[in-house]
Image (tube, helix red, strand yellow):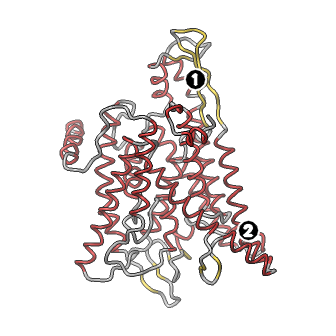
Amino acid sequence: MDEETEEKKPEFVKKIAKFLPAVGKPEYKQSLNTRLKWTGIALLCYFVLSYISVYGLSPSSYQQFQLFQIVLGSKMGSLMTLGIGPIVTAGIILQLLVGSKILKWDMTKPEGRSKFQLWDKVLAIAFCFLEGGAYVLAGALPVSGGPPVMIFVILQLAAGGIIVILLDELVSKWGFGSGVSLFIAAGVASQIFIGLFSPLAAQGRIAGAIPGFISSFFAGNMSLGLAYLLPVLTTALVFVIVIYAQGVAIDIPLTFSAMRGFGRTWSLKFFYTSNIPVILTAALIANVQLMGHFGVSQTPEGLSCGMVGCFDANGNAVKGIVYYLSSPRNLLVDLVSGTINAPEILRAVTYTAFLAIGAMVFSLFWVNTSGMDAKAVANQLSGTGMQIPGYRNDVRIMESVLKRYIPALTILGGLSIGLLAAFADMTGAIGSGTGILLTVMILYNFYEQLRHEKIEEAHPIVRKIVGE
């Protein structure tokens, strides 16, 4: 009976998928310049839509949703409010179901991966409506009207989320790289630029770190100048650490079994699963924070309290689970000034532990569901006629060799990237530490992918970027 039900599931989803919007694959191979052009078009659409406000919302500050905007590539109050949230949430659920064997899909086979992708899209579109409704019903987005206006706002949010799904498909099929990663990097890069150079005032102070430091320096207020300069220094430090860590890898020699003397070196990066575990873990934390706004009630102290914690007037978590799953933004400044307290230290420990363990777990799930485990990789390499020199040309032997490295790199890499993201968050870096970590890794991966393309076809500017 279970097998019959399992067989009917994909058929049911296929029937639904026929009515869903989709981006078709190109009928011929695109040149690198064409793919980069489509990537640029998708990025331009993302930026334009992020400046189109949702009709029916009251003016509001969304400072409490900074983590959402960074991790999910969203801009609150605009058509890009949901960002990549529905895509990531659907991915998290399927990762957990497949990784825990509740859904018994063989991800090493094309059929299993096809099921995963089909269900992923259907769930992502469903979450566009669910998350849009959650934002409105939880009061995260104040609506200026009755139920009809609320429904219209939810439909606008869902439409924006579906557009993001289609833009992601456009990038993956017609463009270069991943739309999800592209939108995260674009959102964080814009926040870093504004945080560094904006001359506009915010809460009585110059918003940009560099203009603020210059102004404080000429005014003779060096303590305020240091407060402006420290985030710039920590931002640069995070950049350097991440770029260095990206270069740590184990080189596996490979040769062509049919042509002796010809071979290559394949690098197993320390961050084997790249930035995916941090994106999924941070998105999970962001969803918990969103749940915290459901069913809140006011306390005599002026706090808004719900099932998982309490928030102050600015929407910042001050008590409960949401407090201990949020990063102390200025821990480094507090340590330097001597104003650190016990609750903040405990908060730093719990946030770091959750981010590190969560990244490690999602790293394991991602390897098993994306065809990156030792067995799948051995079959891929063997299928291309490659073998490890000094060993018999047997896929089982290649798998046993890869098992010495891939499981360890999966665990250690996921754990380390979680610890690095937590450290970066607590330094007070501009754009948030997690945001910088993701952006640097995304840009580095784009750079690595460009180097493996036929770069002579690219524009001269692109060739200069990759050093050709």
Where is residue 180 drawn, in percent x and y? Answer: 44, 51
Point 31% across, 57% down: residue: 162
Q: Decide which of 46, 261 is in the foreground and name it.
A: 46
Residue 229's disc number: 2
Point 51% across, 88% down: residue: 302
Res. 57 image quadrant: bottom left
Amino acid type at circle 2 is Leu
Point 52% across, 44% down: residue: 363
Q: CA distance from mark 2 to mark 1?
A: 48 Å
Per the image, the residue denoted by label 1 is 401
Where is residue 268 drawn, in percent x and y? Answer: 59, 32
Amino acid type at circle 1 is Val
Residue 97's disc number: none
Is residue 405 positioned above or below 88 on the image? above
**In the visual, does 75 lie left or right of 334?**
left
Callout 2: SS: helix
Dot 2 surroundings within 10 Å: few (below 14), some, or many (20 or more)?
some
